[in-house]
Image (spheres, rainbow, N blue to C red):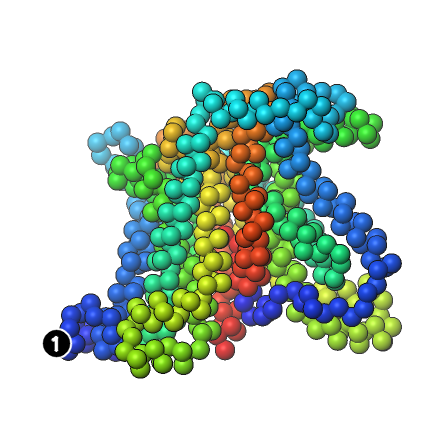
Amino acid sequence: MSARTAQERPQRKGSIFALNESNPLVPYLFLLPHAIFFFIFTVYPVGYGIWISTHRWDPLAPTQPYVGLEFYRNLFDPSTPQSQFFWRTLLNTLFFTAVSVPLLIAVALGLALLLHRPIVGRAFFRAVFFMPGILSVAVMGILWKWMFENQSGLVNIIASEYLGLPRLPYLTTEWLAWVPIVVGTVWWTVGFNMTLYLAALGNIPQALFEAAELDGAGSWARFRHITLPLLAPTTLFVAVTTVLASLQLFGQSLIITGGGPTRTTQSVIMYITEEAFSNNQFSSATAMSFVFGLVMLVFTVLQFRIMARDMQGGMR
Amino acid sequence: MARTVEKLPALAREPRRRLPRDIPRFLLLCVLAMIFLTPIYWMISTSLKPESDTIAQPVQWIPARPTLENYREILASPDGNILRWTWNSVVMAFGYTFVSVTLCVLAAYPLARMRFWGREAWFWFVLSSMMVPGIVTLIPLYIMMIQLNWIDTYHALIWPGVAQAFGVFMLRQFFLGIPRELEEAARMDGANSLQVLRHVILPLSVPALVTLGVFSFMASWNNYVWPLFVVHGDMQTLPVGITLFSSRYVTDYGKLMAGTAIAALPVLVAYLFAQRYLVQGIALTGMKD
C-alpha cells in the first residue's frame, strides 16, 4: 500500500491523523518526529559539509566564494602546512591505533578468561574492570595526567621509591608521551571488550571442553583449538569497533599531553579541530574531515556488514 | 552481537568447586583489581590532602592531614562555577535522553510492526548513517549552530544528536521479538496503534528502554567534543569545565583532583545501581557508542 493511494482515497474514518489501522499514513506519522531531526541534524550536515569544503567559508566575509576542490588539493600538495600536519597527525593516529588495538583485544580476552569460570567475587571483579569506561574522557585524562606527572606522578613515585628506577618525564618526552595515553585508554575502555568476550565465552558449549579433556587435550590445546576459533567472530567485531574508536582519538591526547611535545601525540581529529576553531579555517578543516572520513570508511563498512549479518540472524 | 549472545555468561553452570586450583587465579584478579582501582583511589586521596602533601615524599598513600579544604575552595572557585556546570550537564543529559528515547520508540515501532511503502529502504538509510563518523558533521553542525544562534544555549547541547540511529536499530530488534498475538488481542478490543504501543509494547520493553536510556544518558553526560566547542563560560558542561581547571591549577593537584572527584563520584555511584543494565546492554547489542 503506497503513500500515494493513501492521499487520493477520501478519508474513510475521521482525519488523516487518526491512529487506526485503516489510515495508511499511520506508520509515517510515527516516523515523522525522528525523521525531521534526522534530516536536519544528520543528513543535511553531510551535504552542507560538501558545500562548505568547496567554498571559502568565512564567518566574517559577506560572500562565500566557490573554490572547487582547492582545499582537497591542498591536502595532497606537500608545500602546504595543511598537508604536512594532516598526514603527520594521521600517522600519529594510526600509530596509536596500531599500539592500542592489540592491547585492548589481548587484555580484554585475558580478563574475560580469568573471569569466565565461577570464582569468589566474580561480579565484583567484572564491575571493577568495567568501571573506568563509565567515566568521561575528561576525568580519565586528568587522572592519568596526574598518574604520569613528570615529577610527583604516582607512576614515577612507585618507580623511584619502590623499584629504584629513574623518574621519567613521560608527559614531555617524544614517544614516551604515548605511554600515559595508551595506558589510560586501555584502562578506560578494556572493560567493554571484556564484556563482549565474556558473553561470547558463555555461549561456548561446556561439552566441547569436556570432550576435549577426555581426549587428553591440555588447557593450552583446549584454548588454542576450541576457545580461540569459536571466539573468532567476536574478535573480528571487537577489533573493528576498537579500531574505529582508536582512530577517533581526541580527548586523551588533548587533555594528557595537549598533543605535544611538538605535535608528536596530536591526533588527526585534534588537528582538524585546531584548523577549524583556532585557525578559523572551517572549509579547509571540513575538507580534511571528509578525507579522514573516507579513510575510516573502510572500517565502518566492515562494522556495518557485521552488524547487518548479526541482525539478519537475529530476525529468524 | 545479537545473534551469538542469547544468554549472558552462564552463572548457573558450575560443575564442581575447585578451590585450591582457583587460588592463584583469585590472587591475580585481586592484584589486577587493585591496579584498576589505583587511579580512582589516588584521585580521592590527593583531593583530601593539603597542597604541600600532594607531592610529599615519601609518598602518602593515606592523607596524613585529611582536609575538605580543596572541595570547599573548588566549589567557590572564581575560575568557574562547578555547580552550574553540573546543572548544565544534568539538563543536557536528561533532556537528550528523554527526547531521544521518545523519538526512537516512535520510529522503531512501525519499522518493526507495520507494513508500508519504503519501510526497508528507510530503515537501512537510517542505519547507514551510523557509518558517518562524528568528525564529518562536527564543523557543518557547528556552523548551523552559529546560524541558528544556538551557541551557548541548551538547544545546542540537546537537539543535534537526538535522532540517533542506534536507538532505532536496538528498539526495532527488541520489538521484533515481542509476540504479535499480544498486540492483536489489544486491537480486537479497539485499541489504536498509539495505545497498543503505550499499553502493550512499552510495558514489555522496559529492559530495552532502560538500557537505551542508560546508554543515551552516559553518552550525553560524558560527551566532550561537542560541548567543548558549542558552549562557553557558564554554559559549559561538567567534563569540559573540569578540563579548564586542569589548565588553571597546573600544580595544585589537590584542588584539581577535588574538582575531578566531584565530576566522577556521582557517575561512579550511579554505576553501582545501573551496572546490570549496562553490562546486559553491551552483551545483548554488542555495541558501544
Of A99 and B102, nearer the camera is B102
Quick check: can you spot residue A37?
yes
Are there few (<14), some (14-19), or many (20+) residues within 10 Å of tag 1?
few
Q: Amino acid at mark 1?
A: Pro
Left-right relation of A123 to A164: left
Image position of A181 with respect to A32: above or below? above
Left/right of residue B48 with respect to residue B77 in the rendered view: right
Please state the horizontal and vertical placement of residue B162, each as a whole percent of the image: 37, 51
Location of residue B220 with respect to B247 vertically, above or below: below
**In the displayed structure, would residue A18 be above or below residue B132?**
below
Give the chain letter at badge 1. Answer: A
| Residue drawn at 36 percent across, 80 percent down | B184
Which residue is painted at 27% across and 78% down in the image?
B190
Q: Position of residue B60 (x, y in %)?
A: 73, 26
Q: Is residue B253 visible?
A: no
Q: Position of residue B66 (x, y in %)?
A: 66, 25
Q: Name the image quarter holding residue A115.
A: bottom right
Q: Nearer the viewer, residue A157 or A98?
A: A157
The residue wearing badge 1 is A10
Task: Indicate the quadrant containing the N terminus of chain B: top left, top right, bottom left or bottom right.
Answer: bottom right
In the image, B139 versus B209, the foreground residue is B209
Residue depicted at 65% across the width and 55% down the height: A194
* Residue with the most extreme top position: B52
